Amino acid sequence: SADLAEKNSETSQLLRTLKNIDYSLLDSHIHWRDRTRKTESMEFEGVDVKIETFLGNRNFDIKINLPKQYGKTLQVTAELDGDILYPDQLKGRVYIDGTSLDIKNWLSKTDVNGENDITGLADGSLWIHFAENKIRKVAGDIEMTGLEIANVKRSNIVWNADDVDLMF
C-alpha cells in the first residue's frame, strides 16, 4: 500500500541520516518496559551510549550500570564495517563484558535452566567476530564464584564450586 511505501521511505531516510552522524548519550536514566510482558520493567542509571562513524565503519559502545538484582555493569561494544542498511553484508566484531552478574536472575529470563537451579556470580568477557551473516570466531573468559547447580526434581543432587575460571 502507499502508506507502507511512505513509511519504508521515511525509515530508509532516517537510517541514511543516522548512519552518517556521531552521537553520545551520557550518564542517562533509561526506563525499560518489556511490551511482551516476559520481564518486569527496569530502571537503568548512569547509561552511556556512543555511536561513531568513520570511513564507512560504525562503532557502538553501550555501558550500563545494572539494577542490583542483575549485577554491577554490562558493556556492549560493536565495531562494524559495511552499510547498516544491509545488515546481512556487515562484518565486524562485538565485545560483551559484564561484572558481578547474578547468574540465577539472568537465566530466569531464558529457558536454558530446564530442571536445574543455577546460582552464583559471574564476571566475563566475550568477543564475537562475524562476516557474511555468520559467526566466524568466539573467544572469551568467564570467572564464576559461589557456583551451585541443583536438580529441581532431585533436591539431593547438588554440584557446587567456590571458583570457576573458563577461557575459550
Image: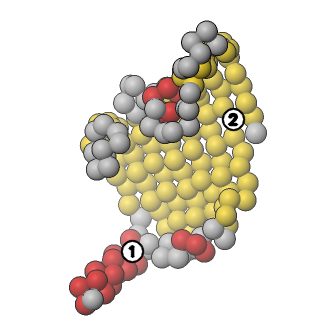
- x and y, in percent, of residue 6 in the image: 27, 86
Please tell me whether mark 2 sits on a helix, a strand or a loop: strand
- Residue at figure coordinates x 40%, y 34% from the top left: 65
Question: In terms of depth relative to the viewer, which is nearer, 48 or 92?
Answer: 92
- x and y, in percent, of residue 105 in the image: 45, 28
- Residue at figure coordinates x 50%, y 33% from the top left: 107
Q: State the image quarter where residue 130 is shown.
A: bottom right
Please tell me whether mark 1 sits on a helix, a strand or a loop: helix
Quarter of the figure with the C terminus: top right
- x and y, in percent, of residue 126 in the image: 64, 43
Question: In terms of depth relative to the viewer, which is nearer, 25 or 35?
Answer: 35
- x and y, in percent, of residue 98 in the image: 54, 35
Mark 1 or 2, nearer chain start: 1
Question: In terms of depth relative to the viewer, which is nearer, 19 or 39?
Answer: 39
- From this view, report whether residue 135 is shown above or below residue 82: above
CA neighbours of label 2 inside 10 A, class few (<14), some (14 to 19), many (20+): some
- Residue at figure coordinates x 48%, y 76% from the top left: 85
- From this view, report whether residue 79 is shown above or below residue 123: below
List the residue tagged with mark 1: 15
Drawn side of residue 100 relative to residue 9, left or right:
right
Kindly report the distance in space between the C-alpha atoms of the residues bearing marks 1 and 2.
Answer: 35 Å
CA neighbours of label 1 inside 10 A, class few (<14), some (14 to 19), many (20+): few
On residue 141, the disc is 2
**Which amino acid, by three-letter code, is at mark 1?**
Leu
Residue 14 shows up from this direction: yes
- Residue farthest along the top direction in this orientation: 156
Quarter of the figure with the N terminus: bottom left
- Residue farthest along the left direction in this orientation: 3
Residue 120 shows up from this direction: no
- Residue farthest along the right direction in this orientation: 168
- From this view, report whether residue 58 is shown above or below residue 43: below
**Which amino acid, by three-letter code, is at mark 2?**
Asp
